[in-house]
Structures are given as structure tokens and as C-alpha cells.
Amino acid sequence: SFSVSSLPRAAPLHLRDGDDDGNNQHITEDGDDLLLPTITFLLASAFASICTMWSEYSVVTSGCGPRSLPDALERGSYLSVLVVAGLSVFVRIVSGGQTLSEIYQNNTSKSGMNYNLYFNLVENLSLLAIVGAFAALAAQSINGEQMDGLSGINVDMCRAIQQSSGE
């Protein structure tokens, strides 16, 4: 019979195959080659989550998205949050419950900067933004707003507000 526990999991660090010298080929020696991608991922993910929560707050309070946040950036932030939250859940499923920070830590050397706090912050921000999206949608529905599609806003009303304010 099939069960989740029968699925293969990543081998613990000390059991992975090494090269002829006994060095583990899967682990970077200093983590420097992952520094820029890691920092970029963390900053972009945090920025996207903050933009998404700002948009959700604006939708709940005014019925429209933030006027000073470009639509393309707002859409990209929502998509980025979905990717990070999906990645977080996916990693937990395939790794037997490990977080992104644990996966990163297991695949880089122990020396250098500890990113656990930052990975946990990014994961929690993205999950909070997902919950916030549902809360904003529920608030709009409870307030009886006429919503166009899945945007959660009345597009015609928001356009009229933008035109009346001269933007």
C-alpha cells in the first residue's frame, strides 16, 4: 500500500556519497557561490510579501489597491508570494518536514552567516501574505463590494477615483 512515509527522502548529510578524498560533493566549501542568489532570493521575497500585504491593506481600507504601487509590481508581488509559499510547502513535503533554512544549512558549510532567521522570516511573511489575501477578499465580500473577477476590487470604481484625482 502507498503511504507518504514510503516516499524517498533526502539522505542525511553524513550518509551522502563523497568523492575519493571523502569530501561531500553536494556541499559547497564556503558557501560564497550561494551568497548572491541567497541574498537576492531573501530580499526579493521579503519585498514581494511587503508589497502584497500593503496592497491587501489598501484593498481592505479603500476598496482599491495602493495608487503609488504600479500594477505590474503589484501583480508580480502576488505571483512571487505564491511561488515562495508554494516552494515552502513543497520543500516541507518532499524533505520530510524540513524548512527552507534547514535545507540551505544542510547543503552549505557550517561556517559563514546563519540565514535561518531570514529564511524563516521570508517563509512566514509569504504565508502571512497568503492569509491576508483571503482576509482581504472576505472583507470585500462582507462589505458587499462589487468585485471584478478574482481581483477583489471594483475596477470601474478604482479607475473613477484615479481619474478624479488627476492621476
Image (cartoon, rainbow, N blue to C red):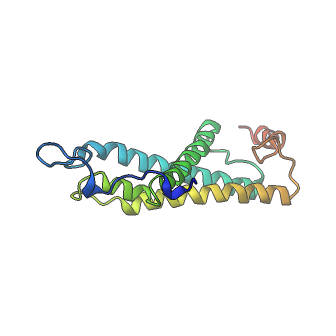
For residue 15, what is the image quadrant? Answer: bottom left
Residue sticking out furthest to the front: 1
Residue sticking out furthest to the bottom: 117
Question: Which of 2/29 is in front?
Answer: 2
Quadrant the N terminus occupies: bottom right
- Percent from the top left, x then y, of residue 108? 27, 52
112 horizontally vs 40: left or right: left
- Percent from the top left, x then y, of residue 129? 61, 56
Position of 85 relative to 79 (above/below): below
105 horizontally vs 129: left or right: left
Quadrant the C terminus occupies: top right
Residue sticking out furthest to the left: 21
For the point 87% across and 47% down, which residue is it? 146
- Percent from the top left, x then y, of residue 22? 14, 49
For the point 63% across and 44% down, which residue is it? 68
Question: Which of 102/160 is in front?
Answer: 102
For the point 39% across and 58% down, which residue is it? 101
Question: Which of 165/122 is in front?
Answer: 122
Position of 92 relative to 44 (above/below): below
77 horizontally vs 108: left or right: right
- Percent from the top left, x then y, of residue 154? 82, 44
Question: Which of 87/37 is in front?
Answer: 87
For the point 59% across and 60% down, which residue is it? 128
